[in-house]
Image (cartoon, rainbow, N blue to C red):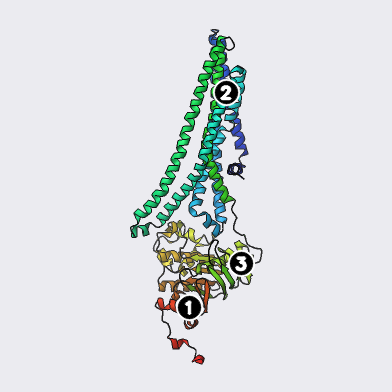
Amino acid sequence: MTSGHAAVALVRSAISDHKRLCAGIIGMQSVSMVAVLSQPALNARIVDSGVIAGNVGYIERTGLLMVAIVACGALSSVVAVALSSRLAADASAELRSRMFRKSARMDAEEYRGFGTHSLLTRSTVDANAVGQAVFAFAATAVTAPLITVGAVVGSFRQSWRLMPVVALTAVFLAVVIGGFVLVVAPLAARLQRAIDRVNLTLREQLVGVRVIRLFRRERTVGVRFREANDDLTGLARRVGAAQALLFPVALAITNIAVAMTTMWSADLIGAGKMTIGDLTAFTGYLSQVVSGLVLFLPVIMLWPRAQASGGRIREVLGSAEADAGGTAQSPASGEAVSVEFAGVGVRYAGAHQSSLAEITVDCPPGGITGVVGGTSSGKSTLMATVARLVDATSGHVDLGGVRVTDLPLAALRRDVVLIRGDHQLVAGTVRSNLRLADGDAAEDRLWRALDAARIGGALRDRDGLDTAVAQGGRNFSGGQRQRLALARAIVRAPRVLLLDDALSAMDRPTAVAALRGLREALPDTTLLIAAQQVATVADADRIVVLDRGLAVGVGTHGELLAGCEVYRELAAAQGRRVPDADARVPEAAR
């Protein structure tokens, strides 16, 4: 499907539920156009039967009729424009809603492929561009064809001898309009991509503004933004220049056509083949022919950009949705579940090597399993496979003996909660953030979760559950944000809780207290804790050591200190006491 057909199909689907509104627009425009098309013929009658004949009464009667017709047409035109505006607003709103719902259903890889900056642009700027084109088209959908066809018929009735003027005018206007579309369409597509780049640059710089200031790199990032902004400005100027030239050129063609009509008709009037009234009517109809074509100019000006925007929206709406999962039954409720990794490997699309390879680990039900390793060792990827934010490309992950890919995704996400170090709080209040986990949770339950996460006391000194939360939780410290995220998970009471570097912003005593409160609140929940700090997982029932995507050690803290060199190096680098060589050698081996 071409981009033009895709844009038309997108608009048709967006307004499919507004048939009565469309019918109203067509009806009002029809009334308006009947009023407009009647004016040249009435003018001719006034000239021939009133002015030339000296019949003042006829002039007055016909003039009053024209005023009434014009008033009716004007009212119908106003109503048609109002209805067109409503249709365009509803179409834009529908596209934004579809984009929002689609973005929420994307899997992580698909979302990363588009990027937040591009999805924002497509949901706002592109949806508005399509809405503007809908308004321009709706306001002229019936008006322009009726004016053009009706005026051609009327001009032919007045004088067929002058029809070549109409034909030449239409040909020249068609050439100008076609050339405009050919020039502007590719520029419009580049313009939307340039808006994406500006949005991306702005988001990167606004998110990292503190770091940028700290290292005094304002000039460097300013150059990056200026380059993206200059590119966008240049494209906008070129599109604007083409749009600015279109109307004057069409007006010049119209004026030339009127001049040609006057010159040609002079001989016809002198030969008695036309009357002055016929000339007046023909000139009026010729202007209406041109006006009908010119009415399409707003559509033509907006169409290239709407075409590009519609194609970009269709890319998102037509993308593959996240796998809804299988139909297997979840493990019986009321009992702890195990998490088992069987030969799990993950390779991201386009990557030269696997992020994980042959990971085989059993995590005991209701126990604590630690996952430790350096940067880029694969900890986050391993955790994500349990929640199916990333699917294993080899091997499989089981939850209570059932493969996670066989479980319905909705059921899996009810049983498994993943908390990452970036906390993911949203603007609102503490209450609204906690109730993301359970919208019906009572306030005493929310307070128990906050107390378990060791942040209830701090909130009681503020506004309690009504304490405001800024976007991203910026009005809380890093450790407080992480404890709020833990409290939200406690409200959810999942069967498996994945903590991916979710304690990193807390000091050691606070982290220990928060973990203790978590275990007291969720005694049967299976915990997986990924961390770089050995101290965070030292008390776990089982610890998995990852190094460059490989599991190089599995055991308890003591066992790994005795038998895993990577774990020993991590512990030593972090100031943990490491047994000497003799202490690590079993007695029987000495």
* Image depth: mark 1 or mark 2 in front: 2
| Tags 3 and 1 touching, CB below 8 Å | no
The residue identified by callout 2 is 166
- Whichever of labels 2 and 3 marks the residue nearer the N terminus, that label is 2
Kindly identify which numbered label has been placed on residue 539: 1
Where residue 33 sits in the image (x, y, percent)? 58, 26
Q: Which of 177 and 505 is in front in this view?
A: 177
Label 3 sits on residue: 404
Residue 15: image location, x then y, percent:
60, 41
Give the residue type that dot 3 points to.
Val
Q: What element carries label 2?
A: helix
Identify the image quadrant of the N terminus: top right
Answer whether residue 83 is visible to the viewer in this image. no
N-terminal of the pair, mark 1 or mark 2, is 2
Distance between the Cα atoms at labels 2 and 3? 71 Å
Q: Residue 123 carries which label?
A: none
Residue 293 in the image: state x and y as whole percent: 55, 29
Q: State if disc 3 and disc 2 touch (CB < 8 Å).
A: no
Cα separation between marks 1 and 2: 90 Å
